[in-house]
């Protein structure tokens, strides 16, 4: 039962860490899925136009780029209910649609060789009601704006309709599609052409064009996701920790017929305490995971296994927590080492259990938590059993496991006194108790005859403290 309690306590304490890691891992995976989808759509476009020249194909690839990077940016920022999609209906007015909670905005994309040609292509009067997106390099140097304004001035008297369309291009042409604070990534004309060529010859490298998680995930997004994970972890930890208390209250109500007010107050404080710690642990675990898996901490750490992140986060945070206890005298160094070893074993089993369970139960969060709960219980039993076996070996052999187990050879006080020796003790102040005389009737007392015997006490060595062996 002790091992079960230890396992459950470990699960409750570290659930927030598991939740934080899983939250950020899923967040990074969502960003990566959008990147992969963007690359897939561009590759599909190129494969469908193998016979067309690259200068024509680059315009269609640019549409996939802007829609895909827009969606990736939305996910990276934590947005919902807004996404972009390339229009495949051959509509002559629009190339890309942005759907935002029931409303739709459309964009026309043109990727011609020069700013003059792109400005001319975008300045058809039928495009005056849609957004306009053009190559990054042609927008950046004001090339399209200058070309469009020049044509607007030239046509102002003879062709006012064309002049209005050119002025619209000068005012509204952008290097990205944008809506509600979300936008795509800019793409130059040369980059669009290179992407087509590289996809065709199989040398396309997403890193060269900023199609990686570290290019989309920013530090502020990591903080935002960490806070979200912390709130979720706090609620989850509170629910898990207060559940046994609620069960105990219900059972008392069934037995007694009423609920004690103090029980409800106690359950409330338990929830509050666990929620604060759960929020901190979940936020820190989520921030570390998002930072490492996004690549913000370097390409090498990006490939680290998520379970190792969970394990490291839990061990470090628990070690810091216990270090304060050692510093304040609430825990001795031997207990600290024992606690760290228990955390390592139990957490490892919890992570293994969570991974296996998540594969069997395809329910987000629940599958992993169920497995980690069972893993924590099993890990606690394994650690407890292993520790008992190790201490039994130390009892028989006198081994100290390099100082982790203390061998105490001091005889207990009872044994010393049984040898007829005086045991020195510090003086203690004892309050005198009043001596109240009582009248008691005399009782008949008879003497018993007992033969003299030899009293033999056999000392044995056993566990007398945390990793401490002595005479018992």
Image (cartoon, helix red, strand yellow):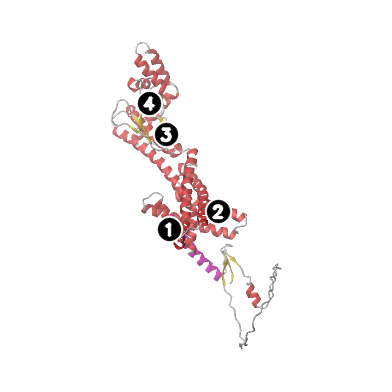
Label 3: how many Cα within 10 Å (few below 14, some 14–19, many 20+): some
User: To which residue does mark 3 refer?
Assistant: 209
Looking at the image, is mark 1 or mark 2 earlier in the sequence? Answer: 2
Residue 350, given in percent of the width and then of the height, sits at 45, 56
Percent x, y for residue 34?
38, 39
Label 1 neighbour load within 10 Å: few <14, some 14-19, many 20+: many
Q: Reading the chain from its start, which is encountered first: label 3 or label 4?
A: 4
Q: Which mark is residue 131?
A: 4
Q: Secondary structure at mark 3?
A: helix
Chain-order first, disc 1 or disc 3: 3
The disc label shown at residue 374, or none = 1
Which portion, as a residue range, is magenta? Answer: 372-396
How far apart, in angstroms, are the residues tagged by discs 4 and 2?
55 Å
Q: Which residue is mark 2?
A: 319
Indicate whether 331 appears above or below 129. Answer: below
User: Front-most of 254 and 76?
Assistant: 254
- Against 326, residue 27 (above or below) is above
């Amino acid at each position: 039962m002790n091992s079960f309690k230890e396992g459950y306590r470990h699960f409750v304490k570290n659930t927030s860490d598991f939740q934080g890691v899983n939250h950020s891992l899923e967040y990074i995976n969502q960003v990566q899925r959008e990147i992969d989808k963007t690359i897939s759509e561009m590759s599909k476009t190129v494969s469908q136009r193998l016979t067309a020249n690259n200068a024509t194909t680059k315009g269609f690839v640019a549409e996939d780029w802007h829609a895909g990077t827009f969606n990736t940016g939305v996910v990276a920022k934590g947005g919902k209910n807004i996404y972009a999609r390339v229009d495949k209906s051959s509509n002559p007015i629009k190339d890309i649609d942005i759907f935002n909670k029931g409303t739709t905005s459309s964009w026309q994309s043109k990727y011609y060789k020069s700013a003059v040609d792109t400005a001319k292509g975008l300045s058809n009067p039928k495009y005056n009601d849609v957004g306009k997106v053009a190559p990054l390099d042609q927008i950046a140097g004001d090339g399209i704006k200058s070309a469009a304004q020049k044509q607007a001035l030239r046509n102002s008297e003879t062709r006012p309709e064309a002049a209005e369309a050119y002025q619209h291009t000068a005012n509204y042409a952008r290097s990205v599609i944008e809506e509600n604070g979300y936008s795509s990534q800019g793409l130059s004309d040369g980059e669009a052409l290179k992407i087509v060529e590289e996809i065709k010859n199989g040398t396309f490298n997403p890193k060269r064009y900023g199609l990686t998680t570290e290019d989309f995930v920013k530090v502020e997004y990591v903080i935002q996701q960490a806070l979200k994970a912390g709130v979720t972890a706090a609620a989850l930890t509170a629910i898990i920790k207060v559940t046994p208390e609620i069960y105990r209250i219900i059972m008392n109500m069934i037995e007694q017929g009423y609920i004690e007010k103090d029980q409800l107050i106690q359950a409330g404080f338990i929830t509050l305490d666990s929620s604060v710690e759960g929020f901190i642990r979940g936020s820190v675990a989520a921030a570390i995971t998002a930072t490492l898996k996004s690549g913000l901490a370097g390409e090498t750490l990006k490939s680290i296994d998520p379970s190792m992140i969970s394990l490291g986060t839990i061990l470090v945070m628990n070690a810091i927590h216990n270090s304060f206890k050692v510093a304040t005298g609430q825990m001795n160094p031997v207990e600290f080492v024992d606690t760290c070893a228990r955390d390592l074993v139990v957490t490892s089993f919890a992570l293994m259990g969570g991974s296996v369970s998540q594969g069997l139960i395809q329910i987000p969060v629940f599958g992993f938590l169920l497995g980690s709960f069972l893993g924590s219980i099993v890990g606690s039993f394994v650690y407890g059993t292993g520790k008992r076996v190790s201490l039994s070996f130390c009892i028989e052999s006198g081994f100290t496991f390099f100082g982790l187990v203390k061998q105490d050879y001091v005889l207990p006080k009872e044994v010393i006194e049984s040898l007829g020796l005086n045991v020195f003790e510090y003086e203690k102040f004892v309050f005198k108790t009043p001596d109240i005389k009582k009248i008691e009737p005399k009782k008949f007392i008879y003497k018993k005859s007992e033969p003299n015997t030899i009293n033999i006490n056999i000392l044995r060595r056993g566990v007398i403290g945390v990793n401490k062996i002595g005479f018992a």
